[in-house]
Amino acid sequence: MTLKWNKQVYQVPIIISETSVAFKHRVEALTGVPIDRQKLLAKKGGWKGPLKDDTILDASTIKETKSLAVTLIGSSETLAGPTQKTTFIEDLSLEELQAAEDAQAQAAMATAEGMIPALQLPPHRRDDRKQEFYQYNRLVSGLPQRQIEQELKYGQGANHRELQGKVVMTLGMELRRSYVNDLAVLSDGTCVSAMDDGHVQLWKHGAQQQDAVHFPGGEGGVDNVVALRQRPSSPIAFATAGRGVVQLWSREGDPMAFLQNIMPGTTPSSLTSVYGGTMMEHIGNNDNDNSILCLASRSRVTRHVNPFQFRLPPQNEEERQRRAQAEAQERAVQEALDKISRCVQIWFSVDGRQESDGLASATSTGTSQIPSLRTKILEPTAGPETSASVTALACLSFPDGSRLLCAGDTQGGIRIWQARRTAGGDDLEFHQCGFYQLKSGAAFCSIVNMEALSSGRLAVSTDHVGNISSYVLTGATSIPIQAPRAVHILDFSQCIASMDAIPTLQSTLTGHAKDAVICMCQLPNGDLLTGGGKLDATLQLWSGTQVAGGATALEPTARKILSDVGYVFSLTVLPDAKDGSSYYAVAAARYNSVKIVI
């Protein structure tokens, strides 16, 4: 036969009854083309199509012909194989996919401008190529990620850490019929919003991660949410209060256990963490904070008297006795509710101990990692003239591990308890170490909100209630203030060294003239955000210098009014998760959505 290949012609003898594989070996020896690359095509008198490996070269394959022409297609060059084997996504396991995602995120983190988890997407997923405000998904809208990075860089970069007041993202449906009552941020940066319809929502990377219901079947909404910091083995990440219970939750937003309130007709409110919190005020860690879980709350009365309960007059002696008995029972219930409203309830667990004194009703998922929390009631030391209904709670933490639990009431009173472990270390005790009353001349005030600040300071928001002498609390030390409606900065640092010391008034912020301040938040740079009530409807930024003013300092004008935000219900700081970064944002609950401000 005549073999043609690569412009060359070879004369090859045909061996009758030879296999095609043996023939291909002879062709390989002649041309250098490997067998797996050979494509042999015969013209008239030969086989049809490419020569197959199972063909026999005999009379059935080759007809009698004087010259059989065969064309060889193939290359004799040896190509170098890939240096790295190609890996397809479909072939990877879930662990390998997560590892690849983490590696890509870490590589992109080096050049990223901050990592505020609730606001920003992972760095390698921020190239959204958008130019204007747009909708991330059906629940989240905001500025493009690239623009957010630029706003952080030029607004808070180069040690210029002041809040600019620009709304860059909105979380939630603005047409939702329920409002956001409170906000918290978890240790991993997830933002948690508590709704007045009982829903609890988790937000991270510009998306809703979870939407759960706080204690299904209960009435009312969620009043408060508090982030917690526990041991890595503990599944508890935050707690919510409302509908008569305190609910404990996992990091993924799964309900783990609930704690029943002490008395029907009330619901826990003003929930705060004494031990185990993640907020910036909890700076003490000398006594192993993450081994103790301790929550404090006041009891908000939800039982209302029915004005038509006794609308029909009694007609005989038997009905008059029943009426008198019912009225006496109603008075006893109201007296009990009034008394419990003056108390503070404590739930706690030390070193994850499982024992319980039976006062805290806890129902959990059955896992042994959830401790049974014990409970205590902190009552007034004497009768009603020495106390009033509690309206706000806050906890001051100090570098040596000391804790001061502060309770404000409707008559301007502030009661202070020092929390500490007992000598055996298996219990917590609360010792009342101070009782004060804020008073501006003849005007008395009620405490609306309290916020723990750094360096042992407490921001107290007050509102004017009257000039009646009956508002005087027996046994309380009077603290003169300059305005009954203002935010007062009190320094309690001396009260740790000496229990007889009286907190000093550092400054008075009177910028909210039309209504009392209902929410406050200290920023990482020392500034203070204050949100006025419905009549005031402003969000004001006070500098650290104004907050730390002298004892006679009266600050009537805030450094800045954040007009883009307006009336808000709750505030919390969203810190940057990137090491060494000073960027931060603020989440503000505005009606039925959460506004993120940088």
Image (spheres, helix red, strand yellow):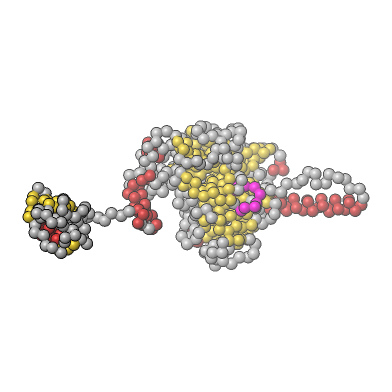
> How many tags in the picture?
0
Q: Nearer the viewer, residue 167 or 469?
A: 167
- In the rendered structure, the answer to whether residue 580 lies left or right of residue 327 reads left
Quadrant where the image shows the N terminus? bottom left
Outermost residue, right side = 316
Q: Residue furthest front?
A: 64
Give residue 271's position: percent from left, percent from top.
58, 51
Q: Is residue 502 left or right of residue 400?
A: right
Compared to residue 29, the image places residue 182 above or below, namely above
What residue is rendered at 54% in x and 34% in y?
A: 566
* Quadrant assignment for the C terminus: top left
Tell me if I can see residue 336 in this picture: yes
Which segment did they paint magenta?
215-225
Q: Say if the magenta span includes residue 222.
A: yes
Choose top left, top right, bottom left or bottom right for residue 151. Answer: top left
Q: At 62% from the left edge and 47% from the top edge, which residue is drawn?
A: 221
Is residue 55 shown above or below 272? below
Name the foreground residue: 395 vs 184: 184
User: Looking at the image, which residue is at 41% across and 37% down?
Assistant: 144
Look at the image and say whether residue 547 sits in the magenta stretch.
no
Q: Quadrant of residue 146?
A: top left
* Residue 582 appears in the figure: no
Q: x and y percent of residue 174 in the render?
A: 55, 38
In percent of width and height, residue 216 lies at: 62, 53
Q: Nearer the viewer, residue 313 or 549?
A: 313
Q: In front here: 455 or 32?
A: 32
Which quarter of the figure has residue 25? bottom left
Principal secondary structure, stretch drawn in magenta: loop
Residue 455 position in % (x across, y down): 48, 48
At x 35% / y 47%, what residue is drawn?
109
- Whether residue 166 sits left or right of residue 490 in the image: it is left
